Image (spheres, helix red, strand yellow):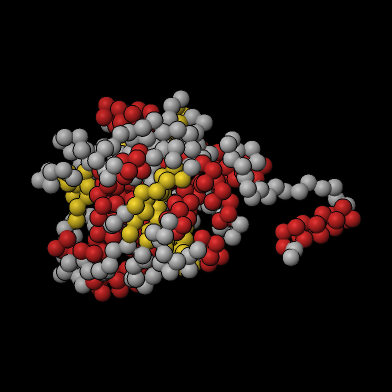
């Protein structure tokens, strides 16, 4: 290990690369209030060949040597090299399943559609990928003797669940600010159960964000929103992992739902590192899918990104992306432009019906994944995505977090939505003849010729 290069990373201003800060500094924006990003010493990383990195990542994956079996920490040198292994806070996130959705793909007119189920993880959404990194850094800072009283975030549900779990694992006090009545029961109960201080505020996500920013600024609470670019470092592993799962082959398209737009930026950042270090040479095209009720990026895309206006996001079933003033707008535009990207949108009815159609083929999608699937359908129908293209749709959360939405869909009680494929349970008395009667009728109705 003596010749091991000293890998290092630091915060750097997006607008002014001369402005740099240590990752142990409590800082979220540059001197002008703009976004920071984490930069790595790429020359040190280049001392290993692309094949050596691939081999190392493959060797570590799914093993139990702490913390390298995690999908994120198996790539530690690329993510957060300076944290000591014993200070990492991990629940072996990542390595989520990527599978060929053959039947559903066929229905969309695609031969090679894959789903990356990022919701199959500790707290049920991809937010785990970023939170393990942020909380590990905080844990490291506390271990070095820096005083950080608590961590906090505003959330549309999944960020708070991840923060609460990882903070609890490391015994770090956590606080979450949620828009009251705008998140699912499952999402609300997660931070409650994990012992976070949970505030339900009478506002929307953007309103919660305003409060948490003040708490961070005035009260020295550590901010865990994606404005904190440490989270992007963990989330960027999703693109690397997809390519790794295809034995280092790059798909033609990656479709991802976007709200605050940290995740689409992270996807591009992971791909950037693989390109720069020679692990891949081809670029996939990126599609960012937004809910039509919360579509500031889509609107900006219509003007070739010449005009960007924050909007007041309207209520959407895709509650985790109900965001009108996305923090990572500038990074997302850069990602879309460099990956020959497209921004598409889906209405409430489109996303709900698409979820139901996909669920009928054995999937179980959250509404945000429904937005991404509906966007994929539109691009296939427009001829932009070709039948033989390899398409990966990133499913961002587990469908079980959103049972309220599914129950209402199948009860046909979702406002303004027709429910074209309802499948409510059939209530019957426990009587054989009645059951048999219904059984034969249903088999015939559904599967009869
Ligand atoms: C956070 C989240 C998103 C959106 O990610 P951004 O980085 O905010 O664009 C999408 N889907 C789910 C389920 C999420 O929790």
Q: Is residue 220 above or below residue 406?
A: above
Identify which residue is drawn at 26% across, 37% down.
Answer: 307
* Quadrant of the image occupied by residue 295: top left
| The N terminus sits in image quarter | bottom left
Residue 214: image location, x then y, percent: 30, 27
Q: Is residue 67 visible?
A: no
Residue 273: image location, x then y, percent: 24, 61
* Quadrant of the image occupied by residue 251: bottom left
Residue lying at the far top in this picture: please name it: 202
Q: Nearer the viewer, residue 438 or 184?
A: 438
Q: Nearer the viewer, residue 346 or 384?
A: 384
Q: Is residue 95 above or below residue 140?
A: below
Q: Nearer the viewer, residue 133 or 265?
A: 265
Residue 343: image location, x then y, percent: 36, 49
* Apparent side of residue 144 relative to residue 255 in the rendered image (left or right): left
Identify which residue is drawn at 37% across, 35% down.
Answer: 324
Residue 355: image location, x then y, percent: 55, 51
Residue lying at the far left in this picture: please name it: 18
| The C terminus sits in image quarter | bottom right
Q: Is residue 83 above or below residue 168?
A: below
Q: Is residue 314 visible?
A: yes
Identify which residue is drawn at 35% across, 27% down.
Answer: 211
């Amino acid at each position: 290990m003596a010749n091991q290069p000293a890998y290092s990373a630091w915060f750097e201003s997006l607008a002014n690369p001369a402005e740099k800060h240590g990752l142990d500094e409590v800082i979220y924006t540059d001197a002008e209030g703009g976004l920071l990003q984490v930069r790595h010493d790429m020359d040190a990383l280049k001392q290993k060949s692309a094949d050596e990195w691939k081999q190392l990542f493959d060797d570590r994956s799914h093993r139990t040597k702490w913390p390298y079996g995690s999908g994120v920490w198996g790539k530690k040198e690329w993510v957060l090299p300076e944290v000591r292994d014993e200070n990492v806070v991990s629940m072996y996130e990542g390595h989520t399943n990527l599978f060929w959705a053959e039947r559903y793909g066929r229905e969309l007119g695609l031969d090679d559609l894959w789903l990356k189920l990022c919701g199959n993880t500790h707290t049920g959404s991809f937010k785990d990928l970023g939170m393990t990194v942020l909380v590990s850094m905080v844990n490291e800072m506390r271990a070095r003797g820096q005083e950080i009283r608590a961590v906090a975030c505003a959330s549309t549900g999944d960020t708070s669940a991840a923060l609460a779990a990882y903070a609890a694992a490391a015994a770090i006090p956590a606080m979450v600010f949620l828009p009251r009545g705008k998140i699912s029961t499952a999402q609300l109960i997660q931070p409650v159960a994990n012992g976070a201080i949970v505030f339900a505020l009478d506002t929307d996500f953007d309103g919660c964000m305003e409060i948490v920013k003040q708490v961070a600024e005035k009260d020295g609470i550590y901010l865990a929103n994606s404005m904190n670019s440490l989270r992007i470092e963990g989330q960027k592993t999703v693109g690397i992992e997809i390519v790794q799962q295809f034995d280092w082959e790059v798909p033609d398209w990656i479709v991802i739902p976007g709200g605050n737009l940290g995740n689409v930026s992270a996807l591009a950042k992971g791909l950037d590192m693989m390109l720069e270090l020679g692990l891949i040479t081809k670029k996939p095209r990126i599609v960012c899918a937004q809910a039509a009720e919360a579509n500031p990026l889509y609107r900006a895309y219509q003007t070739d990104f010449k005009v960007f206006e924050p909007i007041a996001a309207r209520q959407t079933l895709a509650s985790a992306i109900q965001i009108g003033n996305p923090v990572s707008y500038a990074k997302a535009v850069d990602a879309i432009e460099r990956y020959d990207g497209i921004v598409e949108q889906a209405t409430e009815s489109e996303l709900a019906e698409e979820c139901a159609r996909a669920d009928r083929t054995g999937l179980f999608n959250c509404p945000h994944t429904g937005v991404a699937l509906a966007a994929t359908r539109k691009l296939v129908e427009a001829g932009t995505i070709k039948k033989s293209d390899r398409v990966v749709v990133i499913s961002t959360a587990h469908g079980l977090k959103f049972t309220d939405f599914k129950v209402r869909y199948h009860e046909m009680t979702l406002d303004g939505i027709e429910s074209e494929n309802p499948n409510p349970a059939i209530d019957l008395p426990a009587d054989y003849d009645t059951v048999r009667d219904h059984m034969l009728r249903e088999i015939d109705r559904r599967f009869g010729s």
